[in-house]
Each structure stands twice: as C-alpha cells, then as structure tokens.
Image (cartoon, helix red, strand yellow):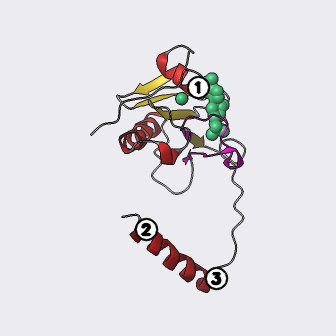
Amino acid sequence: MSTAAVLDTACIFCKIIKGEIPSFKLIETKHSFSFLDIQPTADAHVLVIPKHHSAKMHQLPDEYLADILPVAKKLAIALDLTNESPEGVGYNILQNNGRIAHQVVDHVHFHLIPKRDDKTGLIVGWPSVDSDFDKLGKLHKELLAKLEGAK
Ligand code: 5GP
Ligand code: ZN
C-alpha cells in the first residue's frame, strides 16, 4: 500500500517541491525530487529529498526511502563520479538527523557530495576506539534481543 504524500506549508524543502521556492531541479520521480545544493561543499553538490514531509529518516515511509538511492545512483553517473578505481574521484552520500548530527533543514534529505580532492566535499571526523570484543559481544546480544522483539 502506498502512503499519500504529505507536505508541510512551513517547510523550505516542501516549498521547493511545490515550486514555491525556485531550485536547480535535476531528477524528479513520483516519490523523489533532486536539486543542486545552494551552498555547495563541492561543485555539483546535490540534494535528493522525498516528496513527503518527514523530519528524520525513521519517520519516512519505506516507499519514499526506497526511491531515493536509485535517484542518487543516476545522479552519480550523470555527474561523472563513477570512477571504478579505489583511487581518484569519489563521492559521499550523507544523511543527517537532528541538530547534534548536523541537520539544519528538518525535511529528510540525502546529500550526494562529489569528493575530488582533500579540500572540497565532505571532511569527516571519525573518533574510533580500539576493539573491545567483550563489549561488542554484549551489545550484539542486546541488539539481537531487541530486533527479535521488534519482529
Ligand atoms: P543539513 O545540514 O540539514 O544536512 O543540510 C541542509 C542543506 O540544505 C545545506 O547543504 C544547505 O546548503 C541546503 N539548503 C538549505 N536551504 C536551501 C535552499 O533554499 N535551496 C537549496 N538548493 N539548498 C538549500
Ligand atoms: Zn518538508
């Protein structure tokens, strides 16, 4: 069953979908809309958004989520980011949820950010810690129990 699209009159991205605010539109499908980011971190930084207003990813109906990555894939190809080597040009898909996670616009959006050099595009902080297998094992058990309960 498909979920009827809901847009929010106060939301800037809903206004872009409706054409009330102009955008440099790229691909539009039944469920998704994509356009150039207005403050790009790299040339051809693109946003792919669902044509349904949800602030965070877990609130978005699955059919909207399922449509987004194929659109991002078409854009990555069109933007000539399909370098088959691990070295050279690449790209990041970024999706932020909540202020602490750097979300500014409260309408789900996936960034497609070309990574051509060290200075432009996404720059990541990654505070990893050494493996603690006891801790990982305990967490794994807890999560499996939760996932079993969620079935
Ligand atoms: P966030 O930090 O919420 O993940 O990213 C929001 C993104 O939306 C930012 O990269 C910002 O440049 C972009 N953005 C915000 N307002 C507009 C707008 O009115 N038009 C376009 N094209 N992009 C916008
Ligand atoms: Zn919205």
Residue corresponding to mark 1: 11
List the single residue furthest toward the front: 149
Per the rendered image, the range of residues in magenta is: 91-112
Residue corresponding to mark 3: 132
Give the image quadrant in which the ligand numbered 2 is located: top right
Which of these two is toward me, 35 or 82? Answer: 35
Residue corresponding to mark 2: 147
Residue 65 percent coordinates (x, y): 42, 43
Q: Is residue 86 above or below residue 97?
A: below
Label 3, label 1: how many angstroms apart (C-alpha)?
43 Å
- How busy is the neighbourhood of tag 3: few (under 14 within 10 Å), some, or many (20 plus)? few
- As shown in the figure, which amino acid type bears the numbered disc 2? Leu
Q: Is residue 9 left or right of residue 76?
A: right
Disc with the residue nearer the chain's start (2 vs 3): 3
- As shown in the figure, which amino acid type bears the numbered disc 3? Asp
- Quarter assignment of residue 28: top left
Residue 101 located within the stretch drawn in magenta: yes
